[in-house]
Amino acid sequence: MRTPRADLLPRCDRLRVLALDVTDPSSIHQAVEAAGEIEVLVNNAGIGMPGALEGISMTAVREIFETNTYGTMALIQAVLPQFRQRRESVIFNVTSSVTVKFLPLLSVCTASKAAVNSFTKSLALELEQFNVRVNLVLPGRAPTTRFGENARSRMQSTIPESYADLAQNTFAEWGKPSPVTETRDVAEAVWRAAKEPSEFTYRTFIKESLRLSVHQKIVWPSMALIAA
């Protein structure tokens, strides 16, 4: 996290929280150096900005891609030298189920996450020769995290008047009860896939609400894990 807070997690002598800004090359270098040997990398940094494309500045678009897309690539690039040498490492890129179940007013965020999906699948083919497994996790709506709160704080004037009716109807739909992904769901899926890869030899794991047609298997509420 950019500003580490020791009170967010239980105290443990085997846990160390490091400062990391995935948009800052020097921060990435310092964090990787301080971490030492890394076995599993989970790219979970992400920001959102609900709004119509017409109302979002290109500066804001670039900010979203810097964190969601380029930050993921930069962090992986930083650990690859040791992962190649180790020849037994795992990478998890956490994106979102909106990349398979499209929603209005999320076009920019969806694009930044979908880019990571395709990047992950191609990267898996590159790193297979070094026994580096690359996985993709697609959580669903997660109201217990601060992602939605942070996204709303960036909205401001991202909804032009011409899109007001669409926004009202969309936000009303989002407010209805629906399956959610808990933080524990993601953590347990990542832990199991990292420690027990034989259980995750399927191509795609998906909740029924998303209804992907290829190699379906139900595992977690409103979440998919794609073993690339």
Image (cartoon, rainbow, N blue to C red):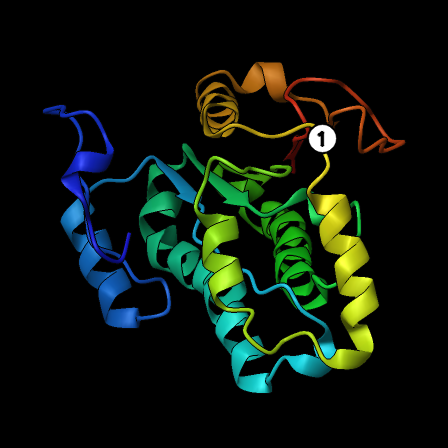
Position of residue 199 measured from the top left corner of the image (x, y, whole percent): 60, 14
Other-residue count near label 1 (Cα within 10 Å), few / some / many at <14 / 14–19 / ≥20: few
Q: In this view, does 160 lie above or below 37?
A: below
Decide if residue 103 is in sight here. no
Q: Where is residue 52, by image quadrant? A: bottom right
Residue sitting farthest toward the bottom: 58
Q: Is residue 177 left or right of residue 192?
A: right
Quadrant of the frame with the C terminus:
top right
Q: In this view, does 120 lie to the left or right of 72?
A: right
| Residue that appears at 63% across and 79% down | 56
Q: Identify the amino acid type marked 1.
A: Ser
Position of residue 112 measured from the top left corner of the image (x, y, whole percent): 62, 63
Position of residue 136 measured from the top left corner of the image (x, y, whole percent): 60, 40
Q: Name the residue under label 1.
A: 178
| Residue that appears at 68% across and 59% down | 110
Residue sitting farthest toward the right: 213
Q: In this view, does 170 lie above or below 71?
A: above
Residue sitting farthest toward the left: 13
Position of residue 203 measured from the top left corner of the image (x, y, whole percent): 73, 29
Decide if residue 73 is in sight here. yes
| Residue that appears at 18% across and 45% down | 5
| Residue that appears at 73% across and 18% down | 218
In-front residue for pair 26/97:
97
Q: Is residue 166 left or right of residue 39?
A: right
Task: Give the total of numbered labels.
Answer: 1
Q: Where is residue 150, by image quadrant? A: bottom left
For the residue labelled by badge 1, is the local secondary structure a helix, a strand or a loop?
A: loop
